[in-house]
Image (tube, rainbow, N blue to C red):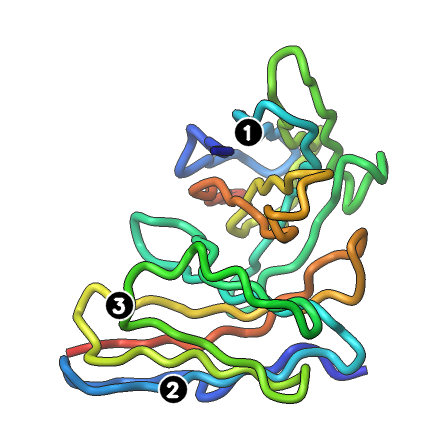
C-alpha cells in the first residue's frame, strides 16, 4: 500500500515568511510524528499526535512552530517568521499501534534564505 | 532525559571486511532500541529492533544493558550497505514519553570496493 507522503518535497523561502508542510500518514495509522533532520543536530523529535488525545508538543523549538492534525489523518506543520536556522529536512512518520514500527515519509527539505 | 550517542560520524571499510557501528544510550528506565538506515535518496527505514532479535541483511545488534550499548555488526560488509545509520531509543512503559524516538547523531558508512 501507499506509504507516508509529504509535500512539498522541497521548499525555498525567504527569512520572515511563513511556511506550511503537509504530511499524509498511512491509512489507519493513529499515531503521527514530526521530526527535524538538520546538519549538526541529527534527528530531533518535534511533535506527536495520538488519536484524539492532546498532542505532545515537547519537542517544538519555539512558539513559531505549530502543528495540527485534522480528522485524525492529514497533518500540517507550520513555521511562522522563518529563520535561517529552520533550514532542515522535516520528516513525518506514522504508526498503527503502541508496539508498532514508525514508518517515515520522504521528508520536506526546507531552505530559508 | 534519555540520550543516544553514536561516537563515529563516518566509518569507511572495504568490501568483505567486518563493520561495527557503536551506539550507547543513557536512560534510567526500560528502553527499546532500534537501528534505522537511510540509503542515498531514500527515506529513513527500520533496519532492526532489539525485541525482535533478528538478523536483517546480515546485520545483528544485541542490547547490552550492563554497558548500555546496542552496537550494530555485520561480519562481511557489502557495497550496498553504504548508507547513513541511526540508532534510536524509545522509552517503554512511560505514556508521557509518547512513543517518540530519540535518535543518535548518525554514522555514515562507506563500503569501498
Q: Is residue A93 left or right of residue A91?
A: right
| A106 w.r.t. B62: above or below | below
Q: Nearer the viewer, mark 2 or mark 1?
A: 2
Residue A20 disc label? 2
Same chain letter for marks 1 and 3: no
Q: Residues within 10 Å of mark 1 (few under 14, many from 20)?
A: many
The residue lying at 62 percent from left, 27 percent from top is B71
Counting residues from the start of the chain, the first of labels 3 and 2 encountered is 2
Q: Quadrant of the N terminus of chain A?
A: bottom right
Q: What residue is shown with label 1?
A: B23
Q: Disc 2 on helix, strand or loop?
A: strand
Q: Disc 3 on helix, strand or loop?
A: helix
Q: Disc 1 on helix, strand or loop?
A: loop
Q: Output the chain of dot 2.
A: A
Give the Cα separation between the discs numbered 3 and 2.
Answer: 13 Å
Q: Nearer the viewer, mark 1 or mark 3?
A: 3
Q: Is residue A83 left or right of residue B10?
A: left
Amino acid at each position: 500500500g501507499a506509504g507516508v507522503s509529504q509535500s512539498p518535497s522541497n521548499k525555498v523561502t525567504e527569512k520572515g515568511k511563513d511556511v506550511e508542510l503537509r504530511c499524509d500518514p498511512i491509512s489507519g495509522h493513529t499515531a503521527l510524528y514530526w521530526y527535524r533532520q538538520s546538519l549538526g543536530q541529527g534527528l530531533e523529535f518535534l511533535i506527536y499526535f495520538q488519536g484524539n488525545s492532546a498532542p505532545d508538543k515537547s519537542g517544538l523549538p519555539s512558539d513559531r512552530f505549530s502543528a495540527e492534525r485534522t480528522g485524525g489523518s492529514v497533518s500540517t506543520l507550520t513555521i511562522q517568521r522563518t529563520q535561517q536556522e529552520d533550514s532542515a529536512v522535516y520528516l513525518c512518520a506514522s504508526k498503527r499501534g503502541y508496539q508498532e514500527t514508525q514508518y517515515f515519509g520522504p521528508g520536506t527539505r526546507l531552505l530559508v534564505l | 532525559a534519555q540520550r543516544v550517542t553514536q561516537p563515529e560520524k563516518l566509518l569507511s571499510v572495504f568490501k568483505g571486511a567486518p563493520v561495527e557501528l557503536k551506539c550507547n544510550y543513557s536512560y534510567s528506565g526500560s528502553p527499546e532500541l532500534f537501528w534505522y538506515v537511510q540509503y542515498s535518496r531514500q527515506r529513513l527505514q527500520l533496519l532492526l529492533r532489539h525485541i525482535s532479535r533478528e538478523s536483517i541483511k546480515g546485520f545483528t545488534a544485541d542490547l547490552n544493558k550492563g554497558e548500555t550499548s546496542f552496537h550494530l555488526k555485520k561480519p562481511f560488509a557489502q557495497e550496498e550497505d553504504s548508507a547513513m545509520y541511526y540508532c534510536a531509543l524509545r522509552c517503554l512503559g512511560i505514556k508521557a514519553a509518547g512513543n517518540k524516538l530519540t535518535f543518535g547523531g548518525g554514522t555514515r558508512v562507506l563500503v569501498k570496493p
